[in-house]
Amino acid sequence: MGSSPSAANPAPDRDWDVVVVGAGPAGALAAFDLARRGLRVLLVEKRRFPRWKVCGCCLNGQACSVLAAVGLGGLIDGQGGVPLNQIRVGLGGRQASFPLPDGRALSRERFDQALVQAAIAAGASFRPHTSARLGAADARGRTVHLRPGGGRPPGAGGETAVRAAVVLVAAGLAHRCLEDEPGAGVHIQPRSRVGAGCVLPAGTGGYTPGCIHMAVGRRGYVGLVRLEDGRLDLAAAFDRPLLTEAGGPAAGAARVLEQAGFPVPPALAAARWQCTPALTRRATPLAGERFLVLGDAAGYVEPFTGEGMGWALTAAAAATPLVLAGVRAWQPALERQWIRTLQRQVGRRQRLCRGVAALLRQPVAAAALFQLARRVPPLPRRLIRQLNHPPAIAGAPSPVYGPVPCR
Ligand SMILES: Cc1cc2nc3c(=O)[nH]c(=O)nc-3n(C[C@H](O)[C@H](O)[C@H](O)COP(=O)(O)OP(=O)(O)OC[C@H]3O[C@@H](n4cnc5c(N)ncnc54)[C@H](O)[C@@H]3O)c2cc1C
């Protein structure tokens, strides 16, 4: 990897073709894909980079296909991504393993940084540690207010404004960059789980590389995977009452692992845990005058075998033709087209995941589903295949979106 993105390409200009808010997988890939087509792209990120984030760190077949399609097929292996070929599910003390199509485990520090680096190499300007907020639209573009220092409160000084023909809002789960947009809001599902995660040091025993370990408990699940440097990533989703009762995410995770019959790593209690806001949510609007919303910013569904980044990357690649059209001349029809595109590209797969997640929350249904999956292996294989299937993106050169391995 080259120099740190923080030091690269200062962006003194005021007018941009595209401002992308958020440098997670959705934003960084969109910035890359648009910059390599010659657009003037500013990528703004609230946090310092590279940054850690609660995530299972598993890139599924869909994610790998999208990366290959935009010419970044070697990115994950170049960063030492660990090949994944199995998911081991534990429920009620029983366990079963199912094969996975080609996937990779890679820490978010490395993956997101490598994507940002690719965007910079393609010509995008990157402004980390800067918070963005959507301003007013006029005939020439959208104003975006930039505040240095990430989360500093409005009015803290140093705020500047830039203008873009199109803004991509890829600011993740609980962003506030649309707070001045009339009618913008978020619907959080009642009883939505909260996420939590930590990373345990290399040498923590009990979990083999190349396998996603998924412990399903009565009031939450914990996913564990070995990262490129041997550390063990833990990502969990808990019912809120479990966290309160257990006294925190470490004890909550220990309970879920015990219920699933997985070993409880001794380092769990001493680890630095981070929690997320309520997970399952739907954002509105998904598009407006000169802006499109994508990735987790558009809504969140509990992932099953590592789908969130695949959806975020798919949406980013799918946005390209609309952004190209919008930079030439913004039309309200693009807003409707984006909503249909999101629905087609990620909405269907999210419905499937939502259904599985809902079943796994009912103890009797979850046990029955688990037994069925153990007895009839083609069923889980088919479900996993469907979730991993490469997307077909309108406007992409046709051979690119075939099923491709993660290398
Ligand atoms: C417990 C858990 C486990 C998961 N496991 C997996 C998994 O194994 N595989 C998988 O594929 N997915 C997984 N996911 C989902 C995955 O983490 C997300 O779907 C993915 O990160 C979405 O990418 P994104 O680019 O939309 O958002 P993010 O990755 O959240 O990036 C958004 C960025 O925007 C920045 N930002 C926010 N507000 C502003 C602002 N105002 N101005 C500038 N920048 C801003 C944020 O700092 C952040 O860096 C998991 C999620 C959870 C909670």
Image: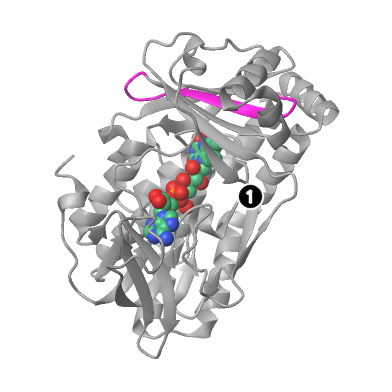
| Callout 1: CB less than 8 Å from ligand 1 | no
Q: How is the image coloured?
A: one colour
Q: Quadrant of residue 162?
A: bottom left
- Residue 223 painted magenta: yes
- Circle 1 is placed at which residue position? 350
| Residue 352, position as x, y percentages in the image | 68, 46
Residue toward you, 176 or 85:
176
Residue toward you, 382 or 178:
178
Residue drawn where x is 48% and y is 36% of the image: 55
Residue furthest to the bottom: 139
| Residue 236, position as x, y percentages in the image | 58, 31
Q: Secondary structure at mark 1?
A: helix
Q: Few, some or many C-alpha atoms within 10 Å of disc 1 (few <14, some 14-19, many ≥20)? A: many
Give the extent of the magenta segment. Answer: 217-230
Residue drawn where x is 50% and y is 68% of the image: 178
Residue toward you, 314 or 274:
274
Q: Quadrant of residue 110?
A: top left
Q: Quadrant of the C terminus?
A: top left
In the displayed structure image, the side of residue 253 where residue 164 appears, left or right = left
User: Hey, what amino acid is under mark 1?
Assistant: Gln
| Residue 217, position as x, y percentages in the image | 70, 24
Vertical side of 176 occupied by 236: above or below: above
| Residue 197, position as x, y percentages in the image | 50, 31
